[in-house]
Image: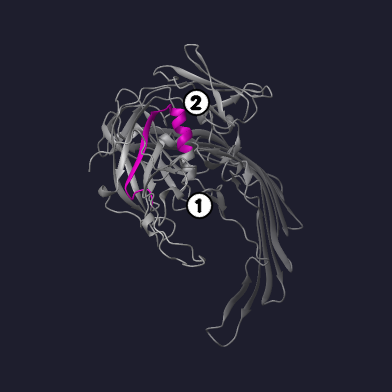
Amino acid sequence: MGLSYGLRYDYYRYLGPRNVRTYAPDRPLATAPILEETAFAAGEAIETYSGWGPRVSFRYSLNAETSLKGGYNRMYQFIHLISNTATIAPTDVWKLSDSFLRPQTVDQYSIGLFKNFKSNIFETSVELYYKDMQNSVEYIDGANLILQNHLETELLPGRGRAYGAELFIRKNLGRTTGWLSYTYSRSERQVITPFEEFAINRGEWFPSNFDKPHELTLIGNYKLSALSSFSATFTYSTGRPITFPVAKFDFAGNALALFTDRNQQRIPDFHRLDVAYNFKFNGKSRFADGDWTFSVMNVYGRRNPFSLFFADQAGALLRPFV
Amino acid sequence: MVQATVAIRSSDGTFTLLTEVAQGLYETPETFRTEVGKSYTLIIETSDGNMYTSLPEHVEAVPELRSVSYSARRVPTQDRLQDAVGVALRAHFDDPAAARNFYYWRLSDITHVVLANPELFTLPPDHPTDPRGPAPKDCCSICYLDETPRIQPFRVSADTDFNGLSTSREIAFIADNGLRFRDTYRARVQQISISASAHRFLTLVEQQLNTTGSVFDQPPAMIRGNMVSLTDPNELVLGYFIAGAESSRHVYVQAAHLTERATPALITDDCRVIPNTNTERPADWSPPPL
């Protein structure tokens, strides 16, 4: 039995210089009248947050080949990614916690069973996890995130949860080695606001931009000789959620696309196969000596979409761009 | 939606029935006016018995549109080699400090002079005796074109950045098609006060119309209306019922005051060949002296 634990104390101050608005109460920030604007000098504290972050993990050996592991930890995050894509884009905005945006708090629980077979030739594990997130950030419908000095008017605080199971099998010895990993994971958000027109998906849980329920990775190595081997890697994951239009309508002579609930459709699934031939070359030339790898990436030429945007065409409906 | 019963109910209990003036187009009586401080609700009963209603729209006061100015403008287009030339209109008004105000601008009653050169008219190329020969016409070199665009441009704004200030906002860009700004162009600029939720609806429409298909676009968003079905609460009803107060005035754009114009379109014929034109000057046509 092994146990490790710790305690962390986070202390965060948001400092000036900055002008901070005070909005009329009981109104959504996007439309609330601005009552006043307070100027904070350089180094002056605008907001302070602090909190304890306990963490504990254990390992319990059931026998020589089997163990049970688990853990819990609490973390605070004082910087938030504000983005309309699930991929890194030049338009991503990183926003520090301030008077309007509280730090994100995450409580994470995990438990797993680890077992080896046949004198450790095979390693296997099953792990379950659950993550509870408070103060995650979502943007309002039609948010203007770029060059926006008062992002608080475009954002909504929400809750998040992520949960799933991971299966892992690895073969360590023999002519054929490799591993297989399958993960079922969900990442969801919920935004509840007293202002119905700003509710996202009516306050119900919906998939976050990072929700990919199924992920599979298969890596195999086949030893052809002492000096050469063949390897293959196959990856598959569910396409990320996206919001597509479901109908069209006219307004003032313009054809408009009707988007409904956020993140209810998905881009096509991602999958790819890479293969490689590896060999060691021990010749007399310094230039050629060493490990050589010849790879073919994306063997069957899968065109995996990276992200998807829409553009307005004069007199026509929005056209998607992948 | 045809042959429906359409009415507007005000917060003081008054019902006003609308008349179907064309297929699916309903109008209030000429005398109907909204009143500042009151709320209005649209009620629709379709011919098959379905009932729809809007959420109440509260009418806020609108500041007077003091003046409208204009200037020539060149704007980049998706065609790298060709800019669009046109005229930008600016509304000048004093925003009240006491409340948060939301504005909606649109153009109506658009008329412009069409200049033609009937003296340059020629016979058709397949004329049996004098192909392309000169055949000047007696009439007409000046017409007035009543232009009601199929797509009605609009602008919206909240007073976030100019609350309580005397301000001017660009409220329209009118592209020069070679005909509009050869002489005088007139439009009625309507400055309308709208509710916060109407502003939100129109902003989302404006955003979608301006999407370019890049990472700089706003994320796709639902354009939420304020109509609901009383018959089936789960039915998704599109559209927005807007009630507002209006301050409006005519602006006359005179070619002599423009620093830049598109290449003029030459009409070597009677100007009446252009659809929706006539030679009668509108009764209220009164451009300022040059």
* Nearer to us in this view, A41 or B72: B72
For the point 41% across and 50% down, which residue is it? B271
Task: Residue B203: say if magenta.
Answer: yes
Quadrant in the picture for the N terminus of chain B: top right
Looking at the picture, tell me which residue is in the foreground, B120 or B257.
B120
Query: Which residue, as the protein is rendered here, is positioned at the far bottom?
Result: A284
Q: Residues within 10 Å of mark 2 (few under 14, many from 20)?
A: few
Please tell me whether mark 1 sits on a helix, a strand or a loop.
loop
- Dots 1 and 2 on the same chain: no
Q: Secondary structure at mark 2?
A: loop
Name which quarter of the figure residue B184 lies in.
top left
In this figure, which residue is indicated by the disc labeled 2?
Answer: A195
| Magenta segment includes A265 | no
Q: Is residue A289 above or below residue A273?
A: below
Q: Horizontal placement of B96 versus A258: left or right?
A: left
Query: Residue visible at 50% across and 45% down?
Result: A84
Q: Position of residue B33 (x, y in %)?
A: 43, 20
Is residue A73 something that shows in the picture? no
- The chosen color scheme is one colour
Query: In the displayed structure, would residue A66 be above or below residue B158?
Result: below
Q: Quadrant of the C terminus of chain B?
A: top left
The percent position of residue B220, horizontal first and vertical second, equals 53, 43
- Marks 1 and 2 sit apart, C-alpha to C-alpha, by 30 Å
* Residue range highlighted in magenta: B179-204
Q: Which residue is identified by label 1?
A: B213
- Amino acid found under the numbered disc labelled 1: Gly
Q: Residue at x 31, y 40 (%)?
A: B252
